[in-house]
Image (spheres, coloured by chain):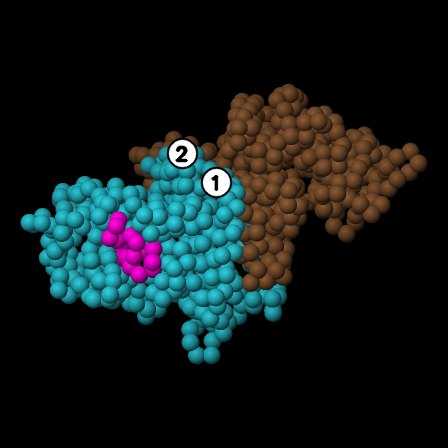
Amino acid sequence: MQTFSFDPVTLPPAAAELRREVRDFLAEHNAKRSPLERAQSWSGSDPEFSRKMGARGFIGMVWPKKYGGHERSSFERYVMLEEMLVAGAPVGAHWVADRQSGPLLLRFGTEEQRQKYLPPVTRGEMFYCIGMSEPDSGSDLASVRAKAVKVDGGYRVTGRKIWTSGAHTAHVMIGLFRTGAPDGRQEGLTQFLIDLRNLDGTDLKAKNNILVRPIRSLLGEHHFNEVVFEEAFVPDSAVVGKADNGWNQVMSELAFERSGPERYLSSIQLVLEMIKELSVNPSAQGHAAIGRLIAHLSTLRQMSVSVAAKLNAGLDPALEGSIVKDLGAVFEQEIPTIAQAIFNVEPRIGGDASDLEQVMGFLVQNSVSYSMRGGTREILRGIIARGLGLR
Amino acid sequence: MSEISTMLGDTVNRLLGDLVTAEMLSAAEDGVWPAGLWKAVEEAGLSLPLVSEKRGGVGCSWLDARVVLHGAGQYGAPIPLAETILAGWLLDCAGIEPPLGPMSIASAAPGAPLHLYRESDGWRLDGVCPRVPWGGTAQHVVVVAMAEGAVRVALIANGDYQATPDKNMAREPRDNLRFDQAPVAACDVAASLPENAVELYGGLIRAVQIGGALERALVESVKYANDRIQFGKPIGKFQAVQQSLAQLADEVAACGAAGSAACAAIDKSLHSNNAADVWLRIAAAKARAGEGAGKGASIAHQAHGAFGFTYEHVLHFATRRLWSWRAEFGSGDQWAQELGRRVVEIGADNLWETLTATD
């Protein structure tokens, strides 16, 4: 049985200073956002807000300065992120690039790729999307079928990617395609940087046989897309890292995706609305319920920061990260149900609905997705069971 | 983990792991005091980790001492180890050198405060303390009470109070103590402690012990799932069992982390004197542990099938403690309700500020 630990961490003094800075920034640029808008959490997207964050040095915070980064500690980035999420700031446009794609390129990208694809991200001008899932390839990522066939000077890419958040606005996709071994194997997958849009806004998709179609969520919102490639050309220079090494690269990317503050703060706006409501209409049942949620919140934050410290120290807390994400998603998802148990209100969006009703209305519907994205509950528990020595 | 906590952890695992057997646990339930275990624990320096060196202790932090409290829970040591650790710390806070031997901590029933007062020949105590762990077996008990306008810690020797024996579900002694003009062996002011220190820190030691007992339940469950063969393979190979035990691991992790966070908060408060933060983290730890104890015990029993329901199997030594400890020093729901009341008072706008103030 593998052991796991979540040692308390004392954040460096610079983190506390940064927290003030971020709160001041939010007071200036995020004050007018409604509770319903805030409830979008990191799916809320506003390119203008991203540019303002870039100008203040809040994107690519831990990256090297020569690529536009700010060489700050990962604790400072953590503090910036949690403040943004608690405030419900629209960080979605640059989210993927800042969390995943940038670190991926720093680790596996060529110097030329880093020079071209990182500095615009830090300015909040270049947005990424991730092309992994396919209609027949979800949790079983090794079954990816979309293929990239070697041609002179590059590859011809054919296939379909789905659940691609932000593909309709992104400038770049980092896509995972089959270049070698037959379907269903971890070998023979390659990651590519695929240009979708120029920084000036010029769309590059149509003339390269790339089609983006919206997939509306049950809320009617358009975040997801289906992206169809028909012999789209990508040059050799677009290969990320080594050809046929995509599986290992993707796995290292996912480790960073599982334990951040976004894994337990997605429903925080409802917790805040519940507290506001209880300050007007207090009840013992309400106090007990909110106290229990705060006990969970405080514990999850402690666990998540502890995992961040391990990542910072170069360790591989894959088991701890999976535990945080599993518990975090349960927490985020139970909040709307608990709110419903305490308050006799009807969750709904629009009309004359109160902030509480609207935030509930959004989260009742949206939170079902929180145990899918970034690894389903079942996959995470499988990883934990492996750590326990059961598999 | 610091060097000292690694060292303490190794000692705890070696000592308690070897000495606390099913036979010892069973005998303790029938009232047999494991004198050898206590002697070994005391000689190894595990009983007074939080007492400063100048008063005969180890002088380590709460976070370091946590591993001993966790171990006390994990092995279900049938001695008042966690209680002695807390009693020693309370005495140290008042500048009193703790005596050797097992100690306990006692608090009055709600609404009937203890009366600590001075007579010509010294301090005396009147009052009733229900359900004191090993109250009749411990050589001394420690109480915290207001007297002459200050919070004071008082030490009373066994023999100077009446003990009526009782037990909890794990059949650990939980005795009712009556103090009737009881002479106080030592008493002094502890400016850093709140009047409810026994209930507050008692909640913490139980929260950390729950983390330990949950870990034991997980280890036993994984062992059982890998050994027990049904349908031609170990039941741990079935995804349904794996998914369920993963949730038990989640509870072990969360309860452990919540207890650690509370211990770290006490250590930080030595410099910042942030009593509100200490209270909040302890409340969170006990509320989280109370929930984890229930969920975790259910999952562990489900994994063990009928065997876990027998006295023969060791699982119940952990789970009966979980069910008892979650109720002691305030149930998780009681802590949660007061935590919620305080959070609502703090207000939504100050919530995050409060949760991050002591980073």
Q: The brown chain is which one?
A: B
Res. B318 in view: no
Q: In the image shown, does B308 or A91 lie closer to the viewer?
A: A91
Residue that mark 1 sits on: A6
* For discs 2 and 1, the disc positioned in front in the rendered view: 1
Q: Residue at x 57, y 33 (%)?
A: B64
Secondary structure under tag 2 reads: loop
In the rendered image, residue A206, in percent from the top left (x then y), is placed at: 15, 65
Which one is nearer the viewer's eye here, A108 or A296? A108
Colour-to-chain, cyan:
A
Read off the magenta span: A114-133
- In percent of the image, x 17 and y 43: which residue is there? A243
Residue at point 44%, 37% (across, down):
A4
Q: Label 2 marks which chain's residue?
A: A
Q: The N terminus of chain A appears in which quarter of the rendering?
A: top left
Binning the other alpha carbons within 10 Å of mark 1 as few (below 14), some (14 to 19) or many (20 upward) gives: many
Residue type at tag 2 = Gln
Image mark 1: chain: A
Q: In this view, does A32 lie above or below A80?
A: below
Residue occupying the point 45% across, 54% down: A80
- In the image as oriented, which residue stretches furthest toward the left? A152
Q: Is residue B339 above or below residue B5?
A: below
